[in-house]
């Protein structure tokens, strides 16, 4: 199994033969953690939408709409991008439309892959097991922040790569594994150094970061099927 | 001092206000190590040229021409990209024209920066001292390999960032510092995991890699001045 890590959407064009590969979309703070939570809380499906105007079209049509730009809930939307917004009693059996600054675009960019799944620390082991069972080449696609590399997505890529065996690793993956190793498993403390932590701290959502650092709280794997993200 | 690391030329567009910043061009295997060696060996100047045809124009005009594509010496050129080709008695007081797969392009891309200097493990401390004295914001520009992130350039970025103090670091720099820390100062052993090592090993130039891992063999800092790379 070959593992390559794409540290920013600008590096996406480096991927060869994506149609044969599984892409794991990683946007730890917060889209991929929130999507994992939404599917874990029993939503029937999630539609990842790149732009706000397209998301708005789903309003008042039996959908619930979530959206964030620059870390803030979009005005008039049912939810923001905090996993705490998506309570079980609100999302169960519903279809949620979600648009975020970075993560939802990565889902769209990956749509030609053999499989597209969503990875977060919340479902780390479940994602690792999914990849082991499929035994195809893997792309760990980090959403980053506005095309910049970020620490939290890189740490997740490293954590996931370390759970897989008999792999051929590219240099980006080696970097991520080193960073995860150096974190000494205290992710929350490590992330306090990151640029994103400083942004979210100003918005008063430290509890979101603590939540997104939790390991293996669910065994679901959100997967893209016919344009919908559903329970895998 | 703000430090940002650009892990691939594809991420170069993320840099704001480059005209106020010092760019350190990093292509450890082998352009920046070779350029450091050429200047250390007394060459009057070096001209970094992006394409082979442009480099060829300098032939038979009082220049010596070095060039490499995909790790191989270009046919008809005086030198390849191995630092061992550029012996003191051959390059002293000469102007060398050099074209390589990755590194020379990064010099050209950076030409609008406040300063452009060349960094390698061979002049690590000298580069750190140069940056401390200038006290401007810094871009650590890793050439990578054909737009992909590579381990050796990232390790150098991490080693250099660790030598600077009172810095604001972006997340890419944090990743590189972790990777350098994990290398336990045995760079050569660490690089054996890298994709580039495997490429160069096939070409029988392991001694080049050993050489490029040496620390602080010179205190010169090659710097771009009016299109020429000279001793800083």
Image (cartoon, coloured by chain):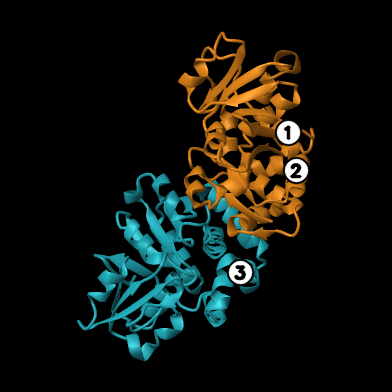
Chain colours: A cyan, B orange
Q: Are marks 1 and 3 on the same chain?
A: no
**Residue A85 in sight:** yes
Q: Residue at x 41, y 55 (%)?
A: A135
Q: Considering depth in this image, is B142 or B166 the residue closer to the camera?
A: B166
Q: Considering the numbered disc 2 on the image, is that residue within a helix, a strand or a loop?
A: helix
Residue B20 in the figure: left or right of residue B216 = left
Q: Residue at x 45, y 84 (%)?
A: A84
Direction from residue B102 to residue B35 in the image, left or right = right
Q: Secondary structure at mark 3?
A: helix
Locate residue B227, reporting x and y percent: 59, 29
The residues tagged by marks 1 and 2 sit, at their Cα atoms, a distance apart of 9 Å
Q: Is residue B30 visible?
A: no
Of badges 1 and 3, the one in the foreground is: 1
Badge 1: residue crowd in 10 Å (few <14, some 14–19, many ≥20): few
Residue bearing the label numbered 2: B130
Q: Are marks 1 and 2 on the same chain?
A: yes
Cα–Cα gap, marks 1 and 3: 38 Å
> Which of B134 and A26 lies nearest the eye of the viewer?
B134
Badges 1 and 2: C-beta atoms under 8 Å apart?
yes
Instruction: Give the SS element for disc 1.
Output: loop
Q: Which image quarter holds the C terminus of chain A?
A: bottom left
């Amino acid at each position: 199994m070959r593992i390559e890590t794409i540290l920013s959407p600008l590096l996406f064009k480096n991927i060869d033969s994506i149609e044969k590969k599984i892409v794991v979309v990683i946007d730890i703070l917060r889209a991929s953690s929130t999507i994992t939570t939404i599917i874990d809380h029993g939503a029937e499906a999630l539609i990842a939408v790149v732009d706000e105007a397209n998301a708005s079209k789903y309003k008042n049509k039996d959908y619930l709409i979530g959206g964030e730009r620059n870390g803030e809930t979009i005005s008039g939307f049912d939810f923001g991008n905090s996993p705490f917004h998506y309570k079980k009693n609100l999302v169960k059996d519903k279809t949620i439309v979600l648009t975020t600054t970075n993560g939802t675009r990565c889902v769209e960019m990956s749509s030609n892959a053999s499989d597209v799944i969503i990875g977060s620390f919340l479902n780390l082991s479940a994602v690792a097991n999914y990849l082991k069972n499929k035994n195809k080449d893997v792309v760990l696609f980090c959403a980053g922040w506005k095309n910049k590399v970020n620490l939290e997505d890189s740490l997740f890529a490293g954590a996931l790569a370390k759970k897989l065996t008999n792999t051929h690793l590219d240099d980006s993956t080696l970097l991520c594994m080193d960073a995860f190793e150096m974190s000494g498993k205290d992710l929350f403390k490590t992330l306090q150094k990151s640029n994103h932590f400083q942004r979210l701290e100003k918005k008063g959502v430290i509890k979101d970061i603590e939540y997104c650092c939790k390991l293996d709280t669910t065994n679901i794997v959100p997967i893209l099927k016919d344009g919908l993200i559903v329970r895998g």
